[in-house]
Image: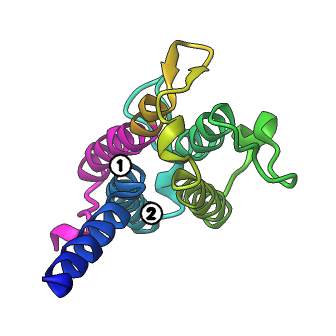
Amino acid sequence: MKKLVFLLFFSCCLMSFAQEKLTQNTIQGVLKGNQEQVLSLAQAFSEEQYNWRPMEGVNSVGEALLHVAGANYFLASKLGFPPPEDVDMMNMAKITGKDNIIEVLKKSNEFVLENVTKIEDGNLNDEVDFGFAQMNKLSGLLIIMEHNGEHKGQLIAYARSNGVVPPWSK
């Protein structure tokens, strides 16, 4: 009987541990998948296509990618994670060239993925002023995930308009 009680107690402890940061880890996993697809699309476009835009006044391919990178830093900063000192958010729009834009995107992806799981379970409901809305930290994490997915869709449309097949569709 003592062994049964011990096994039951041990199992409960393991299940409790497995649930720690379940939300953050799940968001991180979905976000990572979106980021990988956005990055593969970024690499599939030619250098010349980075300046393509569907119409005047709409972000080009390169501008859309820089927007994703900037939003990663902005939203993470509102969650309490300031961008690295070498990131100049005020001048990100001035970055040009496919390789430079991809590097900025990769760095912002790594930064946000690294910080998603740093938010403690007990702090997910803490209120944050994002500038455009008051929400809790969980909502902020979901916005980061959704924002990357939204722009993945935009870039798929851009790719198809330019004869670029998303790499995972080949």
| Contact (Cβ within 8 Å) of mark 2 with mark 1 | no
Q: Residue at x 59, y 22 (%)?
A: 128
Q: CA distance from mark 2 to mark 1?
A: 24 Å
Which corner quadrant of the image does residue 45 belong to? bottom left
Does the stretch in magenta take in 102?
no
Q: Residue furthest bottom?
A: 3
* Mark 2 vs 1, N-terminal side: 1
Image quadrant in which the N terminus is located: bottom left
Q: Position of residue 68 (x, y in %)?
A: 52, 43
Q: Residue at x 53, y 58 (%)?
A: 113
Residue toward you, 65 or 71: 71
| Left/right of residue 29 with respect to residue 124 in the rendered view | left
Dominant SS of magenta comes to helix
**Mark 2: amino acid:** Leu
The residue range painted magenta reads: 144-170
Does the stretch in magenta take in 155?
yes
Q: Which mark is residue 23?
A: 1
| Left/right of residue 63 with respect to residue 164 in the rendered view | right
Q: Which mark is residue 62?
A: none
Compared to residue 56, the image places residue 62 above or below, namely below
Q: Residue at x 51, y 32 (%)?
A: 137
Q: Secondary structure at mark 1?
A: helix
Q: Which mark is residue 39?
A: 2
Q: Position of residue 116 (x, y in %)?
A: 52, 51
Residue toward you, 8 or 105: 8
Q: Residue at x 70, y 44 (%)?
A: 81
Q: Nearer the viewer, mark 2 or mark 1?
A: 1
Which corner quadrant of the image does residue 142 belong to? top left
